[in-house]
Image (cartoon, rainbow, N blue to C red):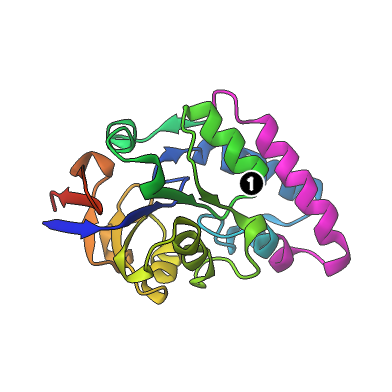
Amino acid sequence: MKIHAEALLFDNDGTLVSSMESVNRCWTRWAHEYGITAEDFARIELHGRPAVEIAADLLPPAVVPEALARIEQLEVEDVAGGVQLLPGTAALLGRLPADRWAVVTSATRRLAEARLEEAGIRPKAMIAADDVTRGKPDPEPYLRAARLLGVDPARCVVFEDAPAGLAAGRAAGMTTVALTTTHAASALIADIVVPDLSSVSAQATVDGVEITTAE
């Protein structure tokens, strides 16, 4: 399938890179430090959600700011060796003009930059948790990314691996491509579903990017 877009918007963890081992390791330690039971921790969806929402689900409001600072510190310190490029990432990004793509992540800017730097990815444009008032599945992160790049949201393609991120892309009126890197295809609602970015190729055009997917 071929799609012509003005801009491509990528989630980070689970889409461009994988840091799931680090995420699980750090959040498990964090939960232990804050006395959160295994049962309470198990019922919370970690992937694709801002840390502030996760902390708010598990802790009293007065403790949340301190707890957020702690989990960010744990994850930043665990970046070395804990981040790997996912298949197809380097090849695809290498074919894109820098002003035609952005990273849209639920991580804080400090953490996202640390993970991307570890993976050798240096986006010109990024929207992080610090930049929005409402995270995914709200469309705000993706709408802000489109505005940052100066493109019509309807001419953007979102690449996501998590249901919350795909819901955000749909709500923003964008074409969605789901990657089955962290969830089964049956759990993902998208215009196109592919295994990973190795199933996507891109060609820069005068006014955007033409992408081809192998479903």
Q: Which residue is mark 1?
A: 109
Q: Could you tell me how many numbered marks the image carries?
A: 1
User: Toward the viewer: 28 or 161?
Assistant: 161
Q: Residue at x 30, y 34 (%)?
A: 87
Q: Magenta stretch mostly in which secondary structure?
A: helix
User: Toward the viewer: 34 or 121?
Assistant: 121
Q: Is residue 83 left or right of residue 215?
A: right
Q: Is residue 31 left or right of residue 167?
A: right
Magenta highlight on residue 214: no
Q: Residue at x 59, y 24 (%)?
A: 80
Please, which residue is most extreme toward the top here? 81
User: Toward the viewer: 162 or 171?
Assistant: 171
Kind of residue sitting beneath label 1: Arg
Task: Report which quarter residue 187 is drawn in.
Answer: bottom left
Magenta span of residues:
55-82
Query: How far across and down, in percent of the image, does residue 53 sit?
Result: 66, 65
Q: Is residue 159 left or right of residue 102?
A: left
Task: Report which quarter residue 197 is drawn in.
Answer: top left
Please, which residue is most extreme toward the front here? 206
The quadrant of the rendering that contains the N terminus is bottom left
74 shown above or below 168: above
Q: Residue at x 62, y 57 (%)?
A: 129
Magenta highlight on residue 80: yes
Query: How far across and down, in percent of the image, does residue 163 sit?
Result: 41, 65
User: Crowding near pointer 1: few (<14 within 10 Å), some, many (20+)?
Assistant: some
State the SS at label 1. Answer: helix
Q: Residue at x 42, y 46 (%)?
A: 14
Please, which residue is most extreme toward the right here? 62
Query: How far across and down, in percent of the image, does residue 213 sit?
Result: 16, 50
31 shown above or below 170: above
Query: How far across and down, in percent of the image, does residue 65 sit?
Result: 82, 57
